[in-house]
């Protein structure tokens, strides 16, 4: 065990590998290093208050900033594993940012609380419920929403199919918006995990989506960069073996430019069974070629 001070609560996710990952982290100067990540963070009474997850360090060793997932997020996950054998996260399908003292007046707000909708995804639960860009979500099921991170964590912890009630301020007027949550990833329109080989197994093992302006900003990708964002990589798949990771951007397949997720999906689907595919990916400020090794239908 180590000991330290909790220096901050409700910290946003500092990693840019997947902008949809929720925040709400506990920041601590307790020494979190490779080997004790995943262990409990306990208080002075020996009660578990979080699960140590990662550290921020240029050298890779502890330098004073460790992050733990709070038990308020861990508990629903463990309950779901025990009860259902898997974890399913819900989503509304909107991009959200914090209300700040600087922007609150533009939304006719008296304080800096709530989550501002900056994007509404097409054919998402939020779009069908009538949510709009510029709406400010200030309440969830009668409870106050303080910031975007809190709302994201609350929604993610609920079961898909749950109907929630959102208190929304729209042009200074209060509106109640009911939304039926859906499972995150269940309707990814550009989802290469659905491209399967003849034996029914996922062929390449990646889930992708279009590069939106919000995602581009969070990944700090150049404005001229075009491609599809990797959302998921299946363990043991050709994509995993090639070193592909969530947050990277696929720019081309077999040296053919693929500016959208649909074109990436089509190009990979057109690779003959058993043949390899070469992709150009962008990540961490640079581009590199990777080869995905195809397998025959009988493998």
Image (spheres, rainbow, N blue to C red):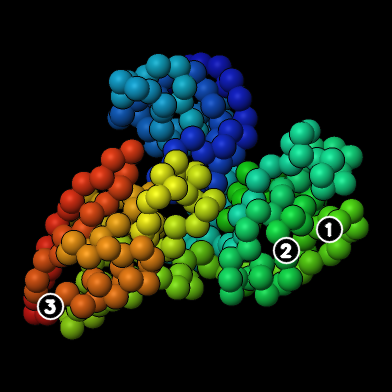
Q: Are marks 2 and 1 in contact (CB under 8 Å)?
A: yes
Which of the two labelled residues, at mark 2 and mark 3, occupies the earlier sequence position? 2
Please report the residue visible at 87 percent of the width from the left and 46 percent of the height from the top: 108
Camera-near label (2 vs 3) is 2
Q: Looking at the figure, which quarter contains the N terminus? A: top left
Q: Are marks 1 and 3 in contact (CB under 8 Å)?
A: no
Please report the residue visible at 40 percent of the width from the left and 16 percent of the height from the top: 63
Please tell me which residue lies in front, 79 or 129: 129
Tell me: residue 110, above or below residue 158: above
Camera-near label (1 vs 3) is 1
What residue sits right under mark 3 in the picture?
A: 273
Which of the two labelled residues, at mark 1 and mark 3, occupies the earlier sequence position? 1
Which of the two labelled residues, at mark 2 and mark 1, occupies the earlier sequence position? 2
- Camera sees residue 217: yes
CA distance for labels 2 and 3: 44 Å
* Circle on res. 170: 1
Dot 3 crowding, Cα within 10 Å, few <14, some 14–19, many 20+? some
Secondary structure of the residue carrying numbered label 2: loop
Please report the residue visible at 73 percent of the width from the left and 65 percent of the height from the top: 131
CA distance for labels 1 and 3: 52 Å
Q: Would you say 253 lies left or right of 131 here?
A: left
- Camera sees residue 77: no
CA distance for labels 2 and 1: 9 Å
What residue sits right under mark 2 in the picture?
A: 132
How far across and how far down the image is residue 259, in percent?
Answer: 36, 63
Secondary structure of the residue carrying numbered label 1: strand
């Amino acid at each position: 065990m180590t000991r330290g001070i909790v220096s901050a609560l409700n910290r946003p996710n500092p990693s840019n590998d997947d902008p949809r990952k929720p925040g709400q982290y506990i920041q601590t100067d307790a020494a979190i290093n490779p080997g004790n990540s995943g262990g409990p963070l306990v208080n002075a009474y020996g009660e578990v208050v979080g699960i140590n997850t990662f550290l921020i360090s240029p050298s890779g060793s502890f330098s004073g900033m460790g992050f733990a997932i709070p038990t308020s997020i861990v508990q629903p996950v463990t309950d779901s594993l025990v009860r259902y054998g898997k974890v399913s996260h819900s989503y509304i399908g909107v991009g959200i940012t914090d209300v700040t003292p600087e922007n609150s007046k533009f939304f006719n707000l008296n304080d800096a609380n709530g989550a501002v909708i900056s994007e509404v995804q097409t054919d998402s639960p939020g779009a069908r419920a009538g949510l709009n860009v510029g709406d400010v979500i200030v309440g969830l099921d009668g409870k106050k929403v303080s910031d975007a991170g809190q709302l994201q964590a609350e929604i993610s912890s609920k079961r898909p199919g749950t109907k929630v009630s959102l208190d929304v301020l729209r042009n200074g007027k209060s509106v109640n918006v009911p939304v039926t949550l859906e499972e995150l990833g269940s309707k990814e329109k550009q989802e290469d995990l659905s491209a399967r080989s003849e034996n029914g197994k996922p062929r390449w093992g990646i889930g992708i989506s279009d590069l939106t302006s919000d995602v581009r900003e969070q990944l700090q990708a150049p404005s001229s960069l075009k491609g599809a964002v990797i959302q998921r990589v299946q363990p043991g798949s050709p994509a995993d073996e090639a070193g592909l990771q969530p947050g990277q951007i696929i720019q081309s397949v077999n040296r053919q430019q693929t500016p959208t997720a649909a074109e990436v999906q089509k190009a990979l689907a057109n690779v003959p069974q058993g043949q390899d595919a070469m992709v150009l990916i962008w990540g961490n400020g640079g581009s590199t070629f990777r080869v995905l090794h195809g397998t025959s239908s009988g493998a």
